Image (cartoon, helix red, strand yellow):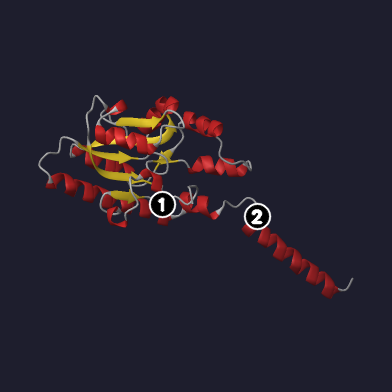
C-alpha cells in the first residue's frame, strides 16, 4: 500500500473518530442537554418567574379583598427539575413508564427550577394561597412533600391537588378550586389570579392575551403533547 493511500485511510479514520465523539451515543440529546447545561434555560425560567411575581403581586395590591386569592402552580418542570430522570432513561435506551416515574419520585432527587423559590416566597408574603396542581399520582404525595421541603420551597399553608386516577383531570381539579367543591370544599371557592406551568394543559385557556398577565409558561423541550 502506498504512503498516499495510507495517509488517506488515516485521515478518514480521524474524521470518523471525531464525528463519533461529537455526535456519538454518549452525547445527550439537545433537548435534555439544553435544560441541564445551558444558561439560557436557567435565565429564561428565572425571567418568567420574575414576571409572574410582579404581575401577581400587582393584581393582589389592586384589589381590596385579598383573602381568597390563589395561584395554581404545576410541579414537574415548573418547580421541580426532573431532567436527571430523562438522562437516566436515555442512557438505558428506555422511555417513560409510570412505574419508573414513580420510582424516580420516591427517590426524592428532583432539583429546583431557577426562580421558583423566590417566586413562591414572594407571593406567600402577599397572602396568596399556593395550590400545587400536578399530574403526579396522589399516592406519591409524601415523597413529593419531602423533596419540596429539602429544596426549601414547601410551606405548611400550601395545598396539593395531585391526580387520583385517569379520570381526575386537571380541568376537574381547577373547577374544584374555583367552586370550592370536592377536595377544596373546606377551603371554599378561591379566586385564581395566576397559573404557572410548562404545558398548555396547565392553563384553563389558550388565550394569548392571558399569557404574561395571568398565565405564565415555562420552557420544556423534553416532553409534552406536541
Residue located 25% across and 29% down the image: 157
x, y percent for residue 123: 23, 41
How busy is the neighbourhood of tag 2: few (under 14 within 10 Å), some, or many (20 plus)?
A: few
* Between marks 2 and 1 in the image, the one whose residue lies nearer the viewer: 1
Q: How many marks?
A: 2
Residue located 59% across and 41% down the image: 95
Do we see residue 6 in this rendering? yes
Residue located 44% across and 32% down the image: 167
x, y percent for residue 79: 37, 41
Report the side of 132 relative to 16 (left or right): left
x, y percent for residue 89: 58, 41
Q: Which mark is residue 172?
A: none
x, y percent for residue 214: 26, 49
Height in image: 134 above or below 52?
above
Residue located 28% across and 56% down the image: 209
Q: Which mark is residue 219?
A: 1
Q: Split into 4 quadrants, where in the image is the N terminus?
A: bottom right
SS of the residue under disc 1: loop
Furthest-left residue in view?
Answer: 64
Residue 211's quadrant in the figure? bottom left
Do we see residue 150 in this rendering? no
Q: Which mark is residue 24?
A: 2
How busy is the neighbourhood of tag 1: few (under 14 within 10 Å), some, or many (20 plus)?
A: some
In this view, the residue in front, 162 or 182, is: 182
Furthest-right residue in view?
Answer: 1
Residue 169's quadrant in the figure? top left
Between disc 2 and disc 1, whose residue precedes? 2
Amino acid at each position: 500500500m502506498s504512503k498516499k493511500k495510507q495517509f488517506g485511510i488515516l485521515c478518514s479514520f480521524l474524521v470518523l473518530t471525531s464525528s463519533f465523539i461529537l455526535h456519538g451515543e454518549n452525547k445527550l440529546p439537545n433537548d435534555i442537554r439544553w435544560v441541564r447545561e445551558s444558561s439560557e434555560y436557567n435565565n429564561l425560567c428565572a425571567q418568567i418567574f420574575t414576571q409572574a411575581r410582579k404581575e401577581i403581586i400587582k393584581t393582589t395590591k389592586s384589589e381590596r379583598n385579598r383573602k381568597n386569592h390563589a395561584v395554581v402552580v404545576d410541579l414537574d418542570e415548573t418547580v421541580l427539575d426532573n431532567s436527571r430522570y430523562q438522562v437516566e432513561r436515555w442512557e438505558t435506551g428506555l422511555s417513560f413508564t409510570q412505574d419508573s416515574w414513580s420510582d424516580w419520585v420516591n427517590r426524592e432527587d428532583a432539583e429546583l427550577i431557577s426562580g421558583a423559590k423566590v417566586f413562591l416566597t414572594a407571593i406567600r408574603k402577599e397572602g396568596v394561597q399556593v395550590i400545587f396542581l400536578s399530574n403526579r399520582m396522589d399516592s406519591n404525595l409524601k415523597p413529593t412533600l419531602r423533596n419540596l421541603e429539602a429544596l426549601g420551597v414547601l410551606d405548611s399553608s400550601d395545598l396539593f391537588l395531585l391526580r387520583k386516577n385517569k379520570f381526575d383531570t386537571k380541568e376537574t381539579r381547577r373547577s374544584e378550586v374555583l367552586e370550592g367543591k370536592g377536595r377544596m370544599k373546606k377551603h371554599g371557592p378561591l379566586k385564581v389570579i395566576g397559573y404557572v406551568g410548562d404545558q398548555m394543559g396547565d392553563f384553563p385557556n389558550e388565550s394569548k392575551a392571558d399569557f404574561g398577565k395571568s398565565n405564565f409558561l415555562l420552557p420544556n423541550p423534553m416532553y409534552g403533547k406536541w
